[in-house]
Image (cartoon, rainbow, N blue to C red):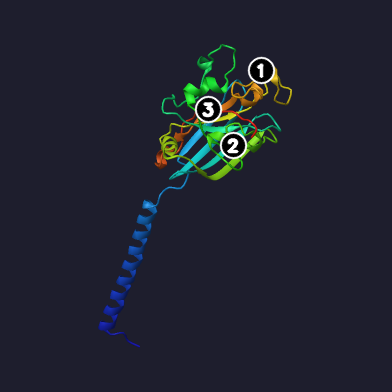
């Protein structure tokens, strides 16, 4: 069967149209991919030890309007004990982790109050259930237990004020974990005295052990490694 010149032209034109359609779809697809928002956290903290605790870890916080999603991993904590963990923020704070220079009474340990000029007041209590406001700063029973000396925390839908959400997005918030065993007896006791936050609690339960500044994560693929630092607060029963 012979194909006429007219039919050959029609077939060639159809092939060109098909190729153009495929190419167009490919371009649109690439464009959409380029414009799609990058998934991942807005801020990241590398947790470094306080009070010679040896506690390290990392945290990621994603901000969606006034809602937070927090992923936190920490290790070398006191086993089998609850550890209060908070996000701190204050407009007048230095937005950093405290250092030995913040040891106001020169007792060779940092308590939570001494760290406030560095990281500011508690704004978010990272409890496992229920309230997450500063009202739960000392809600011991609702903080994670370090069953094997580790904490792996993940909570979504934490509601904060617009001001706090903005502070976190701008890299000015600090994450702090508390609870240290100074005398290595495997529990919190009053060997280091009473907590300055609540005298019914031992200082060991509320002193900070690790801290990290929630640094802004760059959306640029070239710089996906955020820098470290961060702080924390205390605990108490409801």
**Pair 1/3: label in front:** 1
**Pair 2/3: label in front:** 3
- Circle 2 residues within 10 Å: few <14, some 14–19, many ≥20: some
Residue at x 62% of width, y 34% of height: 139
Which quadrant would the N terminus be assigned to in this image?
A: bottom left
Per the image, label 3 sits on a secondary structure element best described as loop
State which tag comes first along the sequence, 2 or 1. Answer: 2
Residue placed most toward the observer, 179 or 133: 133
Per the image, label 2 sits on a secondary structure element best described as strand
Give the spatial CA distance, label 1 vs label 3: 22 Å
Q: Left or right of 26: which side holds 82?
A: right
**Residue at label 1?**
193
- Circle 1 residues within 10 Å: few <14, some 14–19, many ≥20: few
In the rendered image, the vertical position of residue 122 relative to residue 15, given as above or below = above
Q: Which mark is residue 231?
A: 3
Q: Left or right of 183: which side holds 155?
A: left
Residue at x 65% of width, y 20% of height: 194
Picture coordinates of residue 89 (x, y %)?
47, 31
State which tag comes first along the sequence, 2 or 3. Answer: 2
Picture coordinates of residue 193 (x, y %)?
66, 17
Per the image, label 1 sits on a secondary structure element best described as loop
**Residue at label 2?**
73
Picture coordinates of residue 29 (x, y %)?
38, 59
Which quadrant would the C terminus be assigned to in this image?
A: top right
Give the spatial CA distance, label 2 vs label 1: 29 Å
State which tag comes first along the sequence, 1 or 3. Answer: 1
In the rendered image, the vertical position of residue 3 relative to residue 123, given as above or below = below
Circles 1, 3 touching at the beta carbon (< 8 Å)? no
Where is residue 13, by image quadrant? bottom left
Picture coordinates of residue 11 (x, y %)?
31, 78
């Amino acid at each position: 069967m012979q194909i006429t010149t007219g039919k050959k032209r029609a077939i060639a034109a159809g092939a060109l149209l098909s190729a153009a359609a495929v190419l167009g779809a490919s371009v649109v697809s690439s464009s959409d991919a380029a414009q799609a928002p990058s998934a991942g956290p807005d801020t990241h903290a590398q947790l470094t030890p306080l009070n010679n605790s040896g506690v390290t870890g990392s945290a990621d916080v994603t901000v969606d309007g006034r809602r937070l999603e927090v992923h936190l991993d920490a290790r070398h904590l006191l086993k089998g004990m609850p550890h209060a963990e908070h996000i701190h923020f204050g407009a007048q704070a230095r937005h950093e982790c405290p250092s030995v220079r913040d040891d106001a009474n020169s007792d060779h340990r940092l308590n939570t109050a001494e760290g406030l000029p560095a990281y500011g007041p508690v704004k978010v209590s990272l409890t496992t259930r229920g309230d997450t406001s500063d009202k739960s700063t000392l809600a011991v029973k609702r903080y994670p237990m370090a069953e094997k000396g580790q904490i792996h925390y993940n909570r979504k839908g934490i509601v904060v004020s617009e001001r706090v959400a903005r502070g976190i997005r701008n890299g000015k918030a600090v994450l702090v974990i508390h609870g240290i065993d100074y005398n290595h007896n495997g529990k919190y006791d009053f060997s280091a005295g009473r907590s300055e936050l609540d005298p019914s609690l031992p200082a060991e339960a509320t002193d900070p052990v690790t801290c990290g500044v929630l640094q802004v994560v760059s959306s640029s693929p070239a710089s996906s490694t955020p820098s470290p630092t961060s702080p924390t607060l205390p605990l108490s029963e409801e």
